[in-house]
Amino acid sequence: MYRFAGYREGMQEEEQIPQLRSRDQREFNWLQVQFELDLSLILPPSSALELGVCAVVQGRDRTLSYWALTHPGTEADFHDRAGFTISI
């Protein structure tokens, strides 16, 4: 996990969460992945959250594809807050 100071600025590894726990289920043509993340390690409990669900997937032929609930522009940009579609 990485944290950013601003839009595509100041990227640094998130040291409070050294490893993201996950579970996966696989079938012939689908993959389901569940992640557990203790946000209290990096945010105060009263913090509002804006989330963008996204992934970069590398195929067996090593090509990359970019997935998100929405891409607000013509190209994938996971840093664009317009793509943060979940508010908690």
Image (cartoon, rainbow, N blue to C red):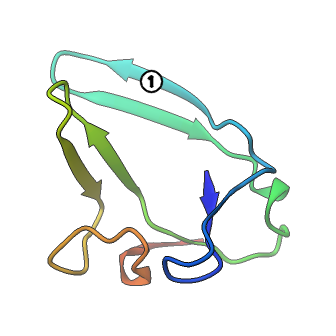
Residue in the image at 15% along x and 24% along y: 29
Image coordinates of residue 30 in percent, x first then y, are: 22, 27
Image coordinates of residue 27 in percent, x first then y, are: 24, 16
68 to 81, vertically: above or below: above
Q: Amino acid at mark 1?
A: Asp
Residue in the image at 61% along x and 50% along y: 1
Instruction: State which quadrant residue 77 falls in.
Output: bottom left
The quadrant the C terminus occupies is bottom right
Residue in the image at 60% along x and 67% along y: 11
**In-front residue for pair 4/33:** 4
Residue indicated by mark 1: 24
**In-front residue for pair 34/14:** 14
57 to 43, vertically: above or below: above
20 to 83, vertically: above or below: above
Badge 1: residue crowd in 10 Å (few <14, some 14–19, many ≥20):
few
24 to 49, vertically: above or below: above
